[in-house]
Image (cartoon, rainbow, N blue to C red):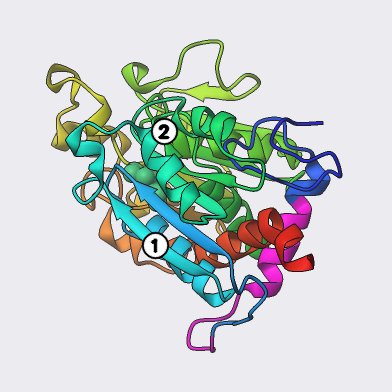
Amino acid sequence: MNEQQRADGSLRHLITLENLPRPLLERLLDHAQSLARPLGARAPVSRALAGCTVANLFTEPSTRTRVSFELAAKRLGADVVNLEVQLSSRVKGESMLDTVFTLQSLHIDALVIRDAEPGVPSTVAAHVAPHVSVLSAGEAHVSHPTQGLLDALTIRQHKPSFETLSIAVVGDIRHSRVARSAFHVFRALGVADLRIVAPPPLMPEPGEFSGCARHTALESGLKDVDVVMMLRIQTERMAQADLPDADHYYTSYGLTPERLALARPDAIVMHPQPMNRGIEIASEVADGPQSVIRDQVRNGVAVRMAVLSEVLAWRSAG
Ligand code: NCD
């Protein structure tokens, strides 16, 4: 049993997708799919989590992830409090754990944490009371589990089966939590041909991403793939001297319409955002017919509703 699960197999914390059982991942994706609505349709709303409180504790910037966790909680009837670093007492020297214990005393049921330091979500999870769940909204370069789930859901909506897919993840793999969570969920769902494409300095260490083909040329990496997942260069995790030159990067690794033509004609293009148009992706591609980038954002709310329902279900049952 994974340490994030309760004895009955339900999910208590979501800190990483690594080693989560496939049936649990599929249950979350099925539930999220049942909550997904086309653009323009009214969002699904329930009172399933009425009386529960979710706290968003973000010490790194976020737009999509924070807003979608907030909407997900509200659409399930939960109360939400948002704490940003400038507002929290962390800047006054209070430790993360003291902040967490304060929130716990205020009857928080789930803590959604984004932090630039590796290990913070699991440290918090090890210290909270048994009724509190910890959900990672992005841990350093290590993991971003709800992003991995929403990426899997987006692919599932466009492709018949994971087993037959070729997926290329392109860009700053080395510093990317999105790539690591994608790797874990795609592997668990049976993707056989998973490629990572990056210039040598942005490749992960050899022990990581085991079983993935590594391509330093974008052209070979894109050949006949079904899914192209583009990533941003994580400048905030790099020393100034290591930053690649933007023009040079676009020339070698930018996804242009010509390069996208190397993938299968029905390939989909993904990006977790924020996007740097003209650096890792051309605007014609980002806004083009093969792009599912806006679907990813929409699916983020459905996935976070499914995760919150799963970890807090025992609350609503009681
Ligand atoms: C990503 C993140 O924060 O890890 N964004 C997101 O959550 N959608 C990717 C990034 O910052 O490049």
Q: Is residue 254 left or right of residue 178?
A: left
Q: Position of residue 283 (x, y in %)?
A: 27, 60
Q: Quadrant of residue 309?
A: bottom right
Q: Nearer the viewer, residue 233 or 263?
A: 233
Residue at (82% x, 31% y) in the render:
1
Q: Earlier in the sequence, mark 2 or mark 1?
A: 1
State the residue position of label 2.
97
Q: Amino acid at mark 2?
A: Leu
Q: Quadrant of the C terminus?
A: bottom right
- Magenta stretch: give its range: 26-42
Which label sits on residue 81? 1
Disc 2 element:
helix
Query: Relative to 48, is 314 above or below?
Result: above
Cα separation, mark 2 vs mark 1, equals 17 Å
Query: Badge 1 local density, few (<14 within 10 Å), some, or many (20+)?
Result: few
Q: Find out whether residue 244 is within the magenta segment.
A: no
Residue found farthest to the front = 105
Q: Tell me the kind of residue under disc 1.
A: Val
Residue 20 position within the rendered picture, expressed as x and y whole percent measured from the top left: 73, 36
